[in-house]
Image (cartoon, helix red, strand yellow):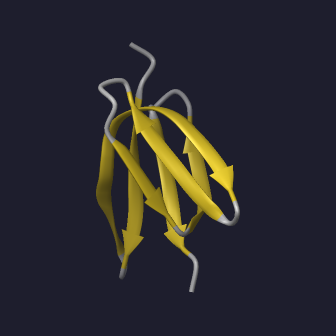
């Protein structure tokens, strides 16, 4: 599978936000995350890093 895990910076460490994400969409300043199984999350964050080989997206909350 080509799904990835999304992490969010919390303080000084990365916390898992959502596993097996297959789609990320930006709309009106928010990120909409969807998984293969239909789970969805909406976060006010910006992308800090995308690691395609490591199947990882790192987000940072917008303050």
Residue lying farthest top? Answer: 1
In this picture, is 6 found above or below 22?
below
Residue 24: give x, y in percent of width and height: 56, 41
Q: Quarter of the image holding residue 55?
A: top left
Q: Quarter of the image holding residue 8?
A: bottom left
* Along the viewing direction, whichever of 42 and 57 lies nearer the viewer: 42
In this picture, is 52 found above or below 59?
above
For the N terminus, the quadrant is top left
Q: Is residue 40 left or right of residue 24?
A: left
Residue lying farthest bottom? Answer: 63
Query: Which residue is drawn at the image coordinates 41% and 47% (left, top)?
Result: 6
In this picture, is 29 found above or below 56?
below
Residue 9: give x, y in percent of width and height: 41, 69
Query: Which residue is drawn at the image coordinates 39% and 55% (left, top)?
Result: 7
Residue 30: give x, y in percent of width and height: 60, 62
Q: Quarter of the image holding residue 31?
A: bottom right
Query: Which residue is drawn at the image coordinates 52% and 69% (left, top)?
Result: 60
* Along the viewing direction, whichever of 58 and 34 lies nearer the viewer: 34
For the C terminus, the quadrant is bottom right
Q: How many marks?
A: 0
Residue 28: give x, y in percent of width and height: 70, 63
């Amino acid at each position: 599978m080509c799904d990835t895990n999304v992490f969010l910076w919390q303080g000084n460490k990365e916390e898992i936000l959502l596993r097996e994400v297959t789609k990320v969409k930006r709309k009106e300043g928010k990120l909409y995350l969807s998984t293969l199984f239909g789970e969805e999350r909406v976060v006010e964050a910006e992308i800090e890093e995308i690691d395609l080989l490591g199947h990882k997206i790192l987000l940072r909350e917008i303050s």
